[in-house]
Amino acid sequence: MSAAEEVVTEGHAVEAVPKRAMTLGTGTSLVVLAVLLLVPLVVKNFVIFQMTMLLIYGLAVLALNILTGGSGQFSLGQSAFYAIGAYTSAILMEQYNVNYALTLPVAGIICFAAGFLFGQPALRLSGVYLALATFALATAMPQLLKLGYFEKWTGGVQGLVVTKPDAPFGLSMSQDMWLYYFTLLITIAIYLFSVNLLRSRSGRAFMAIRDNEIAASAMGVDVALYKTLAFGVSAGITGVAGGLGAIAVQFVAPDSYTITLAISLFLGMVVGGVGWLPGSFIGSAFIIFVPNIAESVSKGLSGAVFGVLLFLVIFLIPHGARQVAILCQQLAARLRR
Amino acid sequence: MLKGLRTAALAAAAIVCVCMLCLPDGALAQKKYDTGVSDTEIKIGNIMPYSGPASAYGVIGKTEQAYFDKVNAEGGVNGRKIKFLSYDDGYSPPKAVEQARKLVEDDGVLLIFNPLGTPSNSAIEKYMNGQKVPQLFVATGASKWSEPKQFPWTMGWQPSYEVEAHIYAKYLLKQKPDAKIGVLYQNDDFGKDYLKGLKDGLGAKASMITAEESYETAEPSIDSHVVKLKSAGVDVFISITTPKFAAQAIKKLAEIDWHPLHIVSNVSASVGGVMKPAGFENSQGILSAAYAKDGADPQWDNDPGMKLFYAFLDRYFPDGDRLDASVVYGYGVAQTLVKVLQMCGDDLTRDNVMKQAESLKDFEPDTLLPGIKINTSPTDFAPIKQLQMMRFKGEKWDLFGDIISGGMSN
């Protein structure tokens, strides 16, 4: 039976986003790129490390954005794919001495397969039910990683320590800086791929499914295929992010990939603006820096402070960073007049 | 439209740039000190799970802060005030790496003291040793923190699970050499470390362990494991469990009227958290081992060390619960750090901190059991290696026997 037979009764969970509004203009993109390229030359290694993490979590949020903002499916299970990617890279690097750069495509492919397979049963679920199913995946993952059967590879609860790569070709830059540029390169590649994917025929199919499954099916879109494909692509990108994360943090352990991570990524997507790809990186900045700010306000109540800040964001700008961008745009247009 | 967006993004980018340039620089190092030390101040870093699943341990960080407040109020260490920077990692290893790097590279601390959690410490161990910054007195019971050859900048503090298990093994070899031991252990690093220690401690007689049962923390009840061990015909029941499960086991044993020699790991030796909920009448005669004094135990009321501890709580940490073992722990470990810093004198380099930390001789913090002493050497990075056996009687633990050292030499 086709998924279209299941009548979707709920309203639009995700507001429709026109595809041109999903990206930044060329000029803005170049400025952002220049900033990302030049800033590491003048800041300390620690800040470079934070920027690397920003890009990595940004990629993971981007992947979720393709799934939710693109095809309208929810997932609270991204941490599971992130973990699979991280462990794939770590195990290949440490147990089989594979070059770190080569582990990333492997992580991506394995996660794509995992996501695609998980997408099959997920077809029968939508909305909150899908969110719950993926939630189960995220809760199960840390325990699966601890299983005695896999311990030979995963290191069990102790995790695995990963060696950080040096800059190649005798380049005289720190490991952090090299890893940053390496991550930046991959991020740009994946970002361009994502933008083009959403502009392509497949992307239009995703969005048609998001806006109205039945209409999409009537127009000849293979709903089942594209829904699972969206899951696969999203999981694949998350896997690459996970692999990069393992290299940057130099350590993988089951405790790194709990449900908290999945919720953080979800939060990043909402704060950045669902369906607005550049917002993924703003959302990523939110989940990295705002907890630190909350902690500096009050140590004992950091969770509560974070909650208040999050509440303010959701209350004042429910559409996240995208809304701010649009507001700025309107303001600038008015000033010019 | 688009132009406006561009301007906005430009402005945002410019702000980001300015923010990053303005980040405060690390403290300027002076010639005779390493980063983080000046004539008036010593910066100490720390990472604690103030939020997340292990947030109950966050009180350790608060106790340490209060202890350093006390030291500063009394004039500091050789005239230098301790500035304690304690960050939250939510028990997440990647966050611990970020916080460790922030402390070392951004705040410029002299050392990171007592970071909590086996996963978090594993995550930062390589980084700390690569940077040659002391990762001093880590707050975990895993046995892997005493490897001075491989990780010369990392040192533990409390007796490891393995050491504690050695002590039970020694006790059994002496008191009950023909015992048939049944072990119930939690299936994680904690349980596995213990089991390994027990087997190592029994050595050639490891076959005394005739039955092993493991449980997952996700299991609602461990009753079936207890019943299985009983039917295996063992006469010593070693419970390597966390408090909730330890209490369950004690209750179940009473329920099925099974009375083997019952040993509970120190983790679950809490009177308030385990024995009371399991029922005092069911807990009589249970054995365990301890290295610190119990704030709940009236026998220490007139102990000079504990009097200092209580005075500290009254004056500097009124929120601290004297019954909470974490508070006792935080006090003891902070006192050990201050001792090391005092020994450093005016040579406050990271090298010298490690040199002094590995030459502690017979140091006795106020909150450790009488006779338990901290000793380290360049080849021994495990400060506390001794415990004393205790038996539950009435509503409290009775210490008995000598202080036993957990070393492998029998």
Image: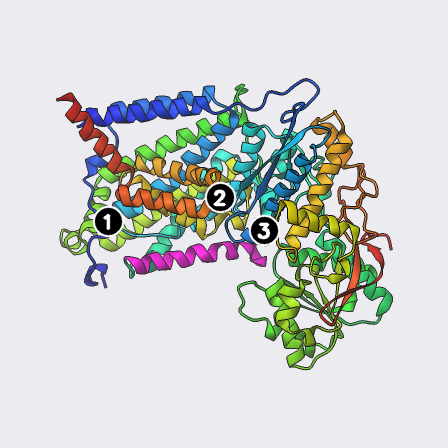
Residue at the spot of label 1: A14
Three-letter amino acid code at disc 1? Val
Quadrant assignment for the C terminus of chain B: bottom right
Q: Is residue A250 visible?
A: no
Residue at the spot of label 3: B319
- Is residue A326 inside the magenta stretch? no
- Boundaries of the magenta span: A127-155
Image: B409 above or below A20: below
Q: Is residue A297 left or right of residue A174?
A: left
Residue at the spot of label 2: A86
The residues bearing labels 3 and 2 have C-alpha atoms spaced at a distance of 41 Å
Image: B352 above or below A76: above
Mark positioned earlier in the residue sequence (1 or 2): 1
Q: Secondary structure at mark 2?
A: helix
User: Dot 3 surroundings within 10 Å: few (below 14), some, or many (20 or more)?
Assistant: few
User: Which is closer to the viewer, label 1 or label 2?
Assistant: 1
Q: Main secondary structure of the magenta part?
A: helix
Taking the view exactly as shown, the residue that stands out farthest to the bottom is B257
Q: Is residue B300 left or right of residue A220?
A: right
User: Which is closer to the viewer, label 3 or label 2?
Assistant: 3
